[in-house]
Amino acid sequence: MESFDHIVVGGGASGCVIAARLASEGGARVLLLEAGYSHHHPLLDMPPGIFKMINGSKYMRYHKTVPQAHFHGRQHDIPQGHVLGGGSTVNGQVYMRGRPSDYDRWDTALRGSQDYVPWGFDDVLPSFTGMEDNNRLLNEYHGVGGPLKVSDPGYIDQLSRDWVQAVQAMGEPFNCDFCGPSQRGAGYYQFMNRDGKRSSSAYSHVEPLKKNPNLTVRLQSEVHRVLIDAGRAVGVVYADSKGSLHEVRAEGEVIVTAGALVTPKILMLSGIGPADHLREVGVDVELDLPGVGNNLIDHPEVPITAYTNGPYGYFKQGEGWRMILNGVQFKLFGSGRVCSTGVECGAFVNPIDRDAPPSIQTFCVGMVYIDRDAQHLVQDRHGMTVTTVVIQPKSRGWVRLASDNPGDMPLVHPNLLSHEDDMETMVAGQKFFCEVFSREPLASKIDRLVLPDAEARATDEGIREHCRRFVKTNYHPCATTKMGHDDDPMAVLDPRLRVRGIEGLRVCDMSAVPDIVAGNTNAPAMMIADRCADMILGAI
Ligand SMILES: Cc1cc2nc3c(=O)[nH]c(=O)nc-3n(C[C@H](O)[C@H](O)[C@H](O)COP(=O)(O)OP(=O)(O)OC[C@H]3O[C@@H](n4cnc5c(N)ncnc54)[C@H](O)[C@@H]3O)c2cc1C
């Protein structure tokens, strides 16, 4: 049987980091198996490409939720990257980490475990700054010279500027660094790109090793399960692009990084998970670990959409002669709208207690932007969308196997906004950010707010119903194989990211987090993989 030192399952944001570091610094022979395609495509590289792909692309896999009873049975999509770099190759590129207190809480939960390693903010910060090549900031929170390019927006539309000032007119401060000492306020995001080109983990970590014989990358290679022998992970089974099955052996470790919706599926197909559920679907139980697939957390996002009274923003800028003009400007001068992801600014606010830590993050997009299951409800015209996101949700869902067939997508129940506190926070966020549209310099450019419409805005119940109809993922599923304390029966991983009860098996993607961070999750996924590499290489 073919063999490697380590096998990494899933070449996403985290998988590329761990594979690259083990191959380059550890000198190990590493096999990286990625189900999706190559990351080399112009649409994937250019910042606004995401809007072309989000509603249908071979580079995404669209999970459909099970019917959500609390949303009148609605099923919504959860797109995930299906390409080398995973989410980091298809995402909105917003560079964010959450708050220091997020990591300090993880650390508190893990402290006292037998194989404790610290996860507090001061402990994880060196991974963030060490990986970073920031084009504006260099201080205790930011670094330069790392492989991940972090940049100010390459283009800022006037509508974004107006919106940032309108939020300030509501009494919120301008914030020049959401990853700095304070998250509060409105401002411009930084992005994982440079000069109009995406900086995914495929580019930052794998590409530089193109000629390194230690790293073998296989694309369109779908891992079905981990091979377990006498309580130890010894390899994996995967299908190649033609569907032929292969077994590969790991002399060292198997590291699963297939993302929070698929990592638990792979563990369960390997017999590791809640025993009752595994028996139900006909999988032989290797280890009863009830936490696998439970504790799914995601950031719920609800749109506020307005039509503008003039040709502002990005409407049709990616079509016809405008696309050609924008493309020519980019090619000739490296400037213009192609350098923008379309989401240039946002805000962190606590609409219930303005001086308390923010509970809502927003993203401001200079166009009408609604998920594909609700697009028919709005007109295709000039407008803008601001989405409000509950950043520390209390709602919890799950991922289960649909069957014992590896070809079946997992069942996903995100259960967004099911906790009353999340709904209350979301309603407060919607009210606050609807009011922003009545503040100058934005108000005079707005024709009318269409979502939530006037009738919905009239009562809290109306806004709740708007939330039930339009809530969607902010694309941050996580915590489905969480790290936890020795005493926590739902802990799947120990603080060293090892699957409890199985030798030689780790998880180091967003599935591993005990709780979601208050912000976007790409940089945290890369940080976790970076620390996992430190652990395997013996640095921590
Ligand atoms: C549309 C979208 C927009 C987003 N916007 C932002 C943003 O602006 N900023 C931000 O910080 N975060 C954003 N995110 C979230 C961020 O990209 C994710 O949190 C991050 O990619 C998670 O990393 P991961 O390694 O856990 O999983 P992923 O990056 O999803 O990687 C999992 C990988 O495993 C592969 N895989 C799956 N199944 C198998 C299998 N059976 N065998 C082999 N390989 C497999 C997948 O193809 C994928 O490449 C966005 C995500 C999406 C989808």
Image: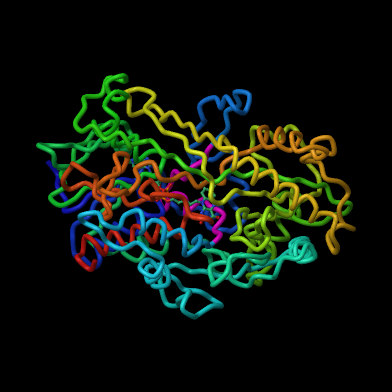
Q: Nearer the viewer, residue 232 or 393?
A: 393
**Side (left or right) of 452 relative to 473:** right
- Residue for point 50% across, 35% down: 414
Identify the residue at horizontal 66%, vertical 58% (top origin): 349
Residue 49 at what x, y percent from top left?
Answer: 59, 52
The structure residue drawn at horizontal position 48% and vertical position 69%, both measured from the top left corner, is 149
Question: Looking at the image, which is closer to me, 528 or 103?
Answer: 103
Please say whether residue 316 is visible from this viewpoint.
no
Q: Residue furthest bottom?
A: 139
Q: Quadrant of the C terminus?
A: bottom left
Where, quadrant-wise, is the N terminus in this rendering?
top left
Residue 490 in which image quadrant: top left
Point out residue 245 in the picture as x, y percentages from the top left corner: 24, 32
Q: How is the image coloured?
A: rainbow
Q: Is residue 457 above or below residue 199?
A: above
Kindly tell me whether residue 58 is visible in this rendering: yes
Number of on-image labels: 0
- Does residue 257 sit above or below 215 in this rendering? above
Is residue 87 in the magenta section?
Answer: yes
Query: In which quadrant of the rendered view does residue 17 lie?
Result: bottom left
Q: Is residue 70 above or below residue 187?
A: above
Furthest residue in direction left, as rendered = 230
Q: Is residue 283 magenta?
A: no
Q: Position of residue 395 (x, y in %)?
A: 52, 39
> x, y percentage for residue 286?
19, 31
Range of the magenta residues? 78-94
